[in-house]
Structures are given as C-alpha cells and as structure tokens.
Amino acid sequence: GQQLNQSPQSMFIQEGEDVSMNCTSSSIFNTWLWYKQDPGEGPVLLIALYKAGELTSNGRLTAQFGITRKDSFLNISASIPSDVGIYFCAGKLIQGAQKLVFGQGTRLTINP
Amino acid sequence: DSGVTQTPKHLITATGQRVTLRCSPRSGDLSVYWYQQSLDQGLQFLIQYYNGEERAKGNILERFSAQQFPDLHSELNLSSLELGDSALYFCASSGDMGWGEQYFGPGTRLTVT
C-alpha cells in the first residue's frame, strides 16, 4: 500500500534551535498537510500545500511541497517549549484510492 | 478549537461489550472521517461518510460500523470489544468529499478492560 516515510522519528533539541523534518514517498501527491498533535489531543492542522514547489509559512513554521510531488518538508524556526509534540504529515494521492495517507509522526522534545 | 466535537471524552468498558462514539462536524462540513490511533502509533483511517453516504473504507473491522445522520453528525459503533481495541478514536471533518483539509476533533479515549 501507499506509505509515507516521515523522518526523523524523534528529535531532541535545545530551545531556540531550528527544526527540520520531512516526508517522502514513491507515490505522487497533489496535497500535503502538516499537523501537530499534543498528548491526548486531536491533531491540529498547521499548513496545507496544494501545488508543487509551493512554500507556505505560518508564523515560525514553513512548509514546502516538493517539486517532484513525492515529498514535503516542515521547518520550525527558533523553537519554543510549546512546540513540543508530535508532527504528522499527510498526503493525498494523485491517483488511486482517494484518502489521506499519514506519516508515522516526528516526536519533538525541547530541552529548556 | 477545530469546531469538531466528540463525545464522550473517555470511555472505559469491558471485553465483549458494545459502545457508540459520537461526532459532530464543523458547521457546514459534509464529510466525516473516523480514525483510530493506538498508543504511540500513527493515525489509521477507518471510514468516511459524505452527506449521509458511505464514501470510503479503510482498515475497519467487521465488528465496527458507522453512520452519518441527516443532521450530519456521525456515530461509530464498536462491538464485541477486545483488549486490542483500546485506542484513541478521532473524528475529522472537511467541507468536501475530496479529502481536502481535515479538521480533527479532540478524540475519545477508549479503554477496554
């Protein structure tokens, strides 16, 4: 089945550092979504991308839709304690079953 | 606040029992999606309804069923519960049938003992 490889699985950083994570696949997507989930809560939509090459920001967060349509990147600048959580990518395939495919998540831990 | 509501927040029940989880989508959204998230796992898609009709099925067990009512709220029914069914169950909604931006509810934590 279709899979999204999200990396890294976990990150341990110092407050103030920048963060980068990505999702890759062998399949082509026409939509990429990035979500953040706090423990025991529902995922919250951070950024939505709809065009190859698109670069979109939401505050300190920036996400890009890869040119090949097979990957996406999320960057967080100047991390703060409230950035702690699990970040999920989700992609909508351009062909085949119309559903969102989710990555396995990147767990971000910040040392103050 | 995403605008998606789910009840109950927590549910504890015994093996073999049946439970119903409820979801109200964002105002105006016609699509409802159900997901299961086990401990430290990703989100597993279960089923989608659009304007009352089943639209897509994922890895939903035969013991599980769902429906969407005319007022667009949805219920997920889980029966003959097993210990492995313990998980967070999320509902999400979107304004279209095409799997666009989905907004998630706060989830129902189900514990089967």
Image (spheres, coloured by chain):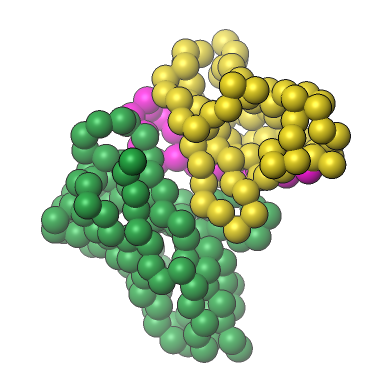
Chain colours: A green, B yellow
Confirm whether residue B5 shows in the render.
yes
Q: What residue is rendered at 79% in x and 40% in y?
A: B112
Is residue B95 inside the magenta stretch?
yes
Q: Is residue A90 magenta?
A: no
In front of the other: A84 or B85 = B85
At a point 36% along the width and 34% down the height, the residue shown is A99
In the rendered image, residue A34, in percent from the top left (x then y), is placed at 40, 55
Task: Determine whether, in the image, residue A8 is placed left or right of residue A37.
Answer: left
Where the C terminus of chain A falls, by quadrant? bottom right
Image position, residue A26 (x, y; %)? 22, 52
Residue A89 as seen in the image, left or right of residue B113 = left
- Residue nearer the viewer, B106 or A90: A90
Q: Is residue A45 left or right of residue A29?
A: right
The residue segment tinted magenta is B93-111
Q: Residue at x 72, y 23 (%)?
A: B79
Residue B112 versus residue A38 in the image, above or below: above
Residue A2, position as x, y percentages in the image: 32, 44
How many numbered discs sit on the rendered protein?
0
Residue A54 seen by the camera: no
